[in-house]
Image (cartoon, rainbow, N blue to C red):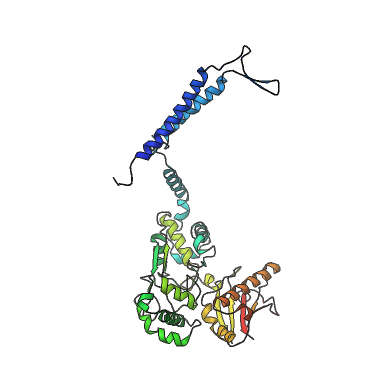
Amino acid sequence: MSDFTSNFWSVFIAGVTILSILACLALLVISGKTKAMTAADNTTGHVWDGDLREMNNPLPRWWVGLFVLTCLFAFAYLYLYPGLGSYPGSLKWSQTGQFDAEVARGNEQVAPLYARFAGMGPEQLSKDPEAMAIGDRLFLNNCAQCHGSDARGSKGFPNLTDKQWNWGGTPDKIHETIAKGRMGVMTPMAAAVGSPEDVRNLANHVLSLSGAPHDSVRANLGKEKFMVCAACHGADGKGNPAMGAPNLTSGIFTHGPGVEAHIVNMINNGKTGVMPAWESKFTPEQLKVLTAYVWGKGGGVPGAPAAAVADAASVSVENGIVKFFFATGKADVASGADKALAEIVAGVKAGKKAIVSGYVDSTGSAAQNEELAKQRAVAVRDQLKALGVDEGSIDLQKPDNVEAGAGAQARRVEVKLM
C-alpha cells in the first residue's frame, strides 16, 4: 500500500454517516421521554402577544412515524447503493456502469441503421445523404468543440477543410487519428539555433518557404539554420506525416498567423498539441461514418467529393487583385492568405492603401447577405492587420455592384491597392 493512501477516510466517513442516523433516532427517543416543566394547564409558561401560549404536547405520531421510516430508508439505501465510504453497495450500482449500460442499449438500437453502411467505402459514404447526416451529428456532438461546427478549426485546432493534414489525409489515416488520437510536439529549438537574431533569421526563412511576407535578407541568413528543423520538417520544409510535422511550404500555421513574431515564439517555446483518442467512445460503425464525414469535408485531398471542394473557401490573385472566395454562409478566410496578400502588404509598406470590398450573392435575404459581406470584409481586414498592416492603411468600401449574382464567384472579397 502506498504511503499516501489508506482506508482511514473511507471508514471515517462510513462511521460518521451511521452514527449521524443513529443520533437522529436517539434524539427522537430522548425527546419523546423527556418531560418539560409545565403548569397545570399543560403549558410551558411561554406566552407571546398576550394569548399565544406554548403547549407541552408530544410530537404527532404520523410525524414520528415518517421520521423513523426516513431513517430506516437511509439504512436500506446505504446497504443497497454506494454511500458508506468505499463500500459499493450490495447491488454494485455505479454511475459509470449505468452510463455504459445506456450506451450499449443505444448502440444496440441503432445497429440496424449502421448495417446499411457496412459494405460502403469512404467515397460511397461521403455521397450518401443519410450517412453524412449521421456523420454531421456525430461531429457536432463530439468534434465541433475544438474544430468548430464548420470543421474550419480555430487557433490551435486544425482546419479540417484545408489542404494540410499533418498526419495524412487519406481515409485510413483519418480513421487512425480519430480512433487512436495524436500528440504533436514541437520542441523548443532556440538553444540549437543560436542567438535571438539567428532565431529571427530562421523565422523569416520559414516564412519564405510559403511565400509569406518576410525579410529576404534575414531569410537568406536563416537558410543554413533551417538544418536543425530538417530532421522533422524535411530539407525542403514539406513536412513528415509519419511524425506529424507540418508542411511549412503551405503557409498554414495552426497555432497562430504566418508572421515573424509567431514563428519566433514557436522556435523559442515550442508547442504540444493533443488530439484525444475516441476509439472507446464510438462503435466501429460510427468511426467508419465519422471518418467518411471528415474526409468528405474536402480539404483538397485527392479523391475528395467535388461538391465539398467547390463550396470550400479559396483565394486567388488576378491582375494584382486578391480575391477571397467563401463557403456558403461562412466568413472564414481560406488558407494561403498570407502568400496571396504578400504583394498587397508590400504595396502598403510602400505608401499605398489597401481597398477591401465584400460582395454578396443574390440568393437568400438581402439584409443578411449584406451583413455577411461586411463580416467577410472585416475578416480579410483582420488578416491584413495580422500581417503587420496598420488599420489606417486599410479602407473598407462597399462595391459599386453589391449584388454579384449567385454561386461561389459572388461570395467573395476583393483586395486591391490604390
Q: Residue furthest left?
A: 1
Q: Which residue is drawn at 41% across and 74% down?
A: 267
Residue 38, image x and y in percent? 59, 15
Q: Residue furthest top?
A: 40
> Which of 104 and 89 lies nearest the eye of the viewer?
89
> Which of 298 and 166 lies nearest the eye of the viewer?
166
Residue 143, image x and y in percent? 49, 60
> Which of 76 and 177 lies nearest the eye of the viewer?
76
Residue 216, image x and y in percent? 47, 87
In the rendered image, the vertical position of residue 241 relative to residue 108, given as above or below: below
Question: Is 308 on the left-hand or right-hand side of 395?
Answer: left
**Residue 375 visible in this rendered orientation of the protein:** yes
Q: How many marks?
A: 0
Q: Residue at x 46, y 60 (%)?
A: 289
In the rendered image, the vertical position of residue 256 relative to residue 321, given as above or below: above
Look at the image and tell me in which quarter the N terminus lies.
top left
Q: Quarter of the image holding residue 264?
A: bottom left
Look at the image and tell me in which quarter the C terminus lies.
bottom right
In the rendered image, the vertical position of residue 17 relative to residue 371, given as above or below: above
**Residue 86 visible in this rendered orientation of the protein:** no
Question: Is 56 on the left-hand or right-hand side of 244?
Answer: right
Residue 396, image x and y in percent? 66, 77
Question: Is 310 on the left-hand or right-hand side of 236?
Answer: right
